[in-house]
Amino acid sequence: MTVELEETSLCTVIEDALKTASKSEALSEPVTMNSRMGSPREWDSLSFVAVFIAVSQAFDVDLDDDDAIHFQAVSPMYQFLDEILNE
Amino acid sequence: MTQLHSELSDVFCHNANVVAVARPRNQDVTYQALGGMIANVQSLIATRAPKAVGILGTRSLEAYVAVMACFFSGVRFVPLNPELPNERLDKIIRYGQVDLLLHDGKRNDIDSFASGFSSDIAEVAAGEDTSDKPVLSKKLQASDIAYQMFTSGSTGEPKGVPITYGSLSHYVSGIRATTGHDTGGRFSQLFDLSFDLSMHDIFVALASGGTLVPASNIDLMMPHSYIQKKCIDYWFSVPLVASVALRGLGDNPVKHKLKKAMFCGEQLPTEYATGFRAFVEPDGPIYNLYGPTEATIAFTAKHFKDADPDLAVVPLGEPFGENVIGIRTHEGEVVEADEGAEGELLLGGPQVFSGYYPDNSVECFVGEDPRYYCSGDLVRVKNGELHHIGRIDSQIKLRGYRIELGDIEAAFRKAFGCAAAAAVVLGTGESREIVLAYEHTKNIDDFSLLDAHLPAYMRPAQFMRFEKIPTNINGKVDRKTIGKMQWAL
């Protein structure tokens, strides 16, 4: 099911992807609009692709691998998704 | 002059118009252009006549130019990771007696650890070409030091591992003879320069007349895409990158396949090797390599064919070339690696270093003929192959990085002035994390002081204070009990 892009829904999708990738029930800190790779610490180079895929599926956007550059922090990710979903 | 010097000289002579380094956002660099840049940096080295050259760089054209310039100038080089805290860089520069620092990209803080003896590689390399190929500028012995890697040390001090031209040359010819002499093609370059596996990337690719394809930071996180978009033919990485690639690939087909894949740096889980087969041509081999920095990049190789359902990890295989092995049993006896033998793996032959420098006091050798390096790895010989069982000390490999837990503990004690600290590894596979127990009268809330002492990959994920650190009956830190505490991982 496609999720509507909002700040909270994006944070939730990322948080769920990180929990699954790190096989943990709780993250070291919650995902907020200020979060970026390394904070929470479960968001590392190994879980990066899990976040990329989860966001792509949740918001039903056809992402190109080159778009990955925008996926290292929540705020630029939100701006990028907002732009392409409203094109 | 070693065989490797000779082979590389031939490559530069006969492949002038072949691409040596691929650069997606810039013009690719041919062997002729690369040779010109190397010759220019060689001129600077000849003028400065340094004892050792520090190369502060990442996966970049400039770093490769500096490495090859030192190699052909016969000057020892010390690879330096730009992400290390300045305090640690300063220490390595002093221990390595670096008196010329070459760096890629602009560094605003360079004066804090290399004041007055640094040069930007790009600026030096861009000078008017003195030659279009590197030239061996002095007579070299195989026993001369080619490079010196600094690894994590149990005392908290970095340990210098000098590797000779002879060892490096044996490695490159040995690994190529064992896994196949490839000619041309595009070679992955995923390892940081300060990780000795990057020397495999650089020297094997160039000795093959191939093209080095440096991975960007995004490529490291999207390896499935890196393989296909950058048309990689020959792959070399730590096993964890294989799992990231598989996660990224999902159910999609692979449009460009590798001719060969090799893994090194930590245990290769069978499921990673089996899964990664999707990225490799049907008849393309997959190899598992093993070896510590002290024995020059890798020492044994295993051609992975079919997964053995009884094995969770791929065996280490056998030593290649003139490398020899022995086993030190649990009773302390040095024996040949015969079927059923079990104990510490001992490494001998032309790839083994001659001792740490400058700290040469560490006891790490046994025997005389052959003289064995004690690897610290526990192995068992089964069906004629080495199987890794574990480590005998507190050294671990985490995400490809070699880490002495004692190094973390020493840094913590120094930063916070506490009496005792114990680092422990929790979890398995990808979710392994380092946690640290410390003894202190009050809680420490801000651990950012550690940033000045430890690189990011060594920082514990969590901390726990104890009034008194748990000890066992012998008074030693009880790591098992610490590991069983309620850590939020």
Image (cartoon, coloured by chain):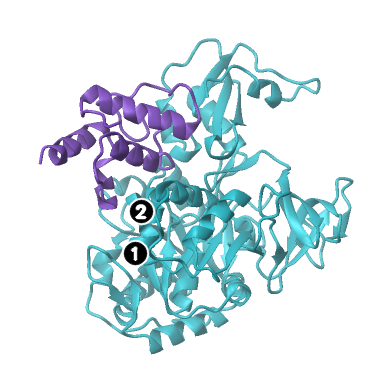
Chain colours: A purple, B cyan
What amino acid type is highlighted by mark number 2?
A: Asp
- Can residue B276 be seen in the rendering of this structure? yes
User: In the image, residue B288 lies at what x, y percent?
Assistant: 61, 60
- Position of B30 with respect to B339 (left or right) is left
> Does the CB distance between marks 1 and 2 fall below 8 Å?
yes
Residues tagged by mark 1 and mark 2 found on one chain of the structure: yes
Residue located at (32% from left, 65% from top): B62
Q: Residue furthest left?
A: A87
Label 1 chain ID = B
What amino acid type is highlighted by mark number 1?
A: Lys
User: In the image, residue B47 lies at what x, y percent?
Assistant: 34, 73
Mark 2 neighbour class, 10 Å CA radius: few under 14, some 14 to 19, many 20 or more: many
Check disc 2 and report the residue beneath it. B219
Q: Nearer the viewer, residue B63 or B253?
A: B253
What is the distance, in whole Å, between disc 1 and disc 2 at their CAs? 10 Å
Q: Earlier in the sequence, mark 1 or mark 2?
A: 2
Q: Nearer the viewer, residue B146 or A45?
A: A45
Residue located at (18% from left, 39% from top): A80
Mark 1 neighbour class, 10 Å CA radius: few under 14, some 14 to 19, many 20 or more: some
| Snapshot quadrant of residue B373 | bottom right
Label 2 chain ID = B
Q: Residue furthest front?
A: A1
Numbered label attached to residue B230 = 1
User: In the image, residue B302 lies at what x, y percent?
Assistant: 66, 63
